[in-house]
Image (cartoon, rainbow, N blue to C red):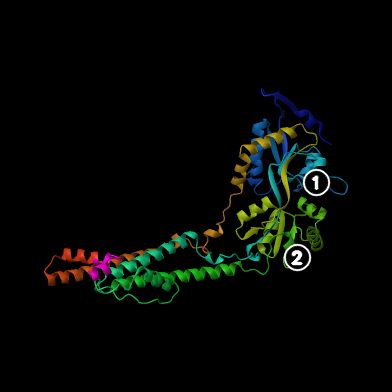
Amino acid sequence: MVRISNMLGIVSLCVVLLLGTEVCIAARQELIITTIKQDPYTMSKGSQLEGYCMDLLAELAKKLGFKYKVHLVKDGAYGRQDEGGNWNGMIGEVVRGEADLAVAPLTLTAAREKAVGMTKPYMQTGISILLRKDIVSEEAGFFDFLSPFSGETWLGILIAYFVTAVCICIVGRLSPCEWSQPETEPNRITLLHSLWYAAGALSLQGAGPHPKAVSGRVISCTWWLFAVVLLACYFSSLSSSQGSDSAPLMIKGFEDLANQDVIEYGTLAGSSTLAFFKNSNNPSYRRIYEHMERRKSFVSSMDEGVQRAKEGNYAFIGESVSLDLAVARHCELVRAHEVIGMRGYSIVTPLGSPMLKNLSVAILQLSEAGELAYLRTKWWASSCIPDSAKGSSLRAHSMKGIFLVLAIGLGIGVLLSLFELTSKSRSTAGEQKKSCCAVLTQELSRRLRMTKTKGDQET
């Protein structure tokens, strides 16, 4: 029976706005709020409570102008009806008049709607599966061989390949040891040969002719060192990623879970999730319920389900938003992509309470203003590093050392080729009694011309 004092303490005040919209605001001296401890909805912080539901309650109190006092539910239950029709948990406290509101992750169900009033959902959720990453296997993609390196690393490798080939071609033209007589003999180190030579080094296969000059050998040795380190990192990351992703079975959803007997699975005892599988006509869902009932694989709390999933060989079935929080807190866990039985979390009021409509309108206003999305981001923040940022996918900054060594080797090689050409120009200038700068300019002009060498030779 609802306490008469509670009903007398609530006064409805209706205000007609200029636009003709009637808004009813229920005011009371102090409302009694019941809740339950569950991370991150309601958590203890010293002598106070904090969490998503506490922030939501504060926003609603600010909008509707009421004061409140929060206490934890005595029996630690959400609310289930027994065979005699009596409710326990937070639902029972609201039904018996021990609390005016229940603000917690309470799922909107038909049975609860008959006993109490439930507002518009403040959060949408569904049913999914939580389990360890190392017992989940996914199908290999066509381009999984690229996974050891990130996109930035592959782009850096491609740029390094073309720059090295161009440097080999330049050294082949500038160095007198590679091209001693530009007027009479063809250049054997062309750009096409340089590209082929660099590609051969990446596959650890020699593609001759090899450079003879010191400058060309410096570039060649640096590129071979770069290729060896690159291939070592690639195969190491590839083998480790394949070893960590390999698993004895593949579980993508509830159909896969129902068709295997290797992994034990269960859900929260007396929860709406269990009622969903119990009342379902889907054969797979019925098999899941019968398996859980036969094995008695239920857990008494959300924390117990998460802990059993962390220990391995156990899949915990629960609300998707709660499972997302567990994944954000425990990096070794993962949630299945499939979500079934979409439903919402609502605030509970006594049946026929004048506050029901006001709370629903306030929840919709908070949703439209983006406040609910902000609270979700605030309390569901993940501390886990994404897989793409782990060592299995090497980024460019993790290999910056070998790229720096390559850049230094290319620079030294080009400078050595200029030094070799300058030495030859100096000796030639002494023999011909000409200026060294004039001879060097003439040599550079001959060696850097691409198409006119044959025509000049014929002339």
Image position, residue 34 (x, y; %): 73, 41
Task: Residue at 45% x, 61% y: name it.
Answer: 155
Q: Nearer the viewer, residue 168 or 6?
A: 168
Mark 2 and mark 1: span between their CA atoms?
A: 35 Å
Q: Name the outermost residue toward the right.
A: 84
| SS of the residue under disc 2 | loop
Question: Which label was assigned to residue 259?
Answer: 2
In the image, is residue 402 above or below residue 53? below
- From the image, tell me which residue sits under label 1: 88
State which quarter of the image contains the N terminus. Answer: top right
Whole-percent x, y for residue 67 in the image: 68, 32
The reply to whether residue 405 is in sight is no
Q: Is residue 208 left or right of residue 16?
A: left
Q: Residue at x 56, y 54 (%)?
A: 383
Q: Position of residue 206 (x, y in %)?
A: 40, 77
Secondary structure of the residue carrying numbered label 1: loop
Instruction: Check disc 2 and give the amino acid type.
Output: Asn
Examine the structure image and report whether residue 452 is included in the region drawn in magenta.
yes
In the image, taking residue 49 as reference, residue 202 lies left or right, namely left
Q: Quadrant of residue 51?
A: top right
Which of the two discs, 2 and 1, sits closer to the camera? 2
As drawn, the label of residue 79 is none
The residues colored magenta run 446-459
In this rendering, the answer to whether 381 lies above or below 258 is above
Q: Considering the whole magenta stretch, tell me its main secondary structure.
A: helix
| Amino acid type at mark 1 | Asn
Give the mark, 2 or 1, whose residue is nearer the N terminus. Answer: 1
- Residue at position x 74%, y 61% in the image: 255
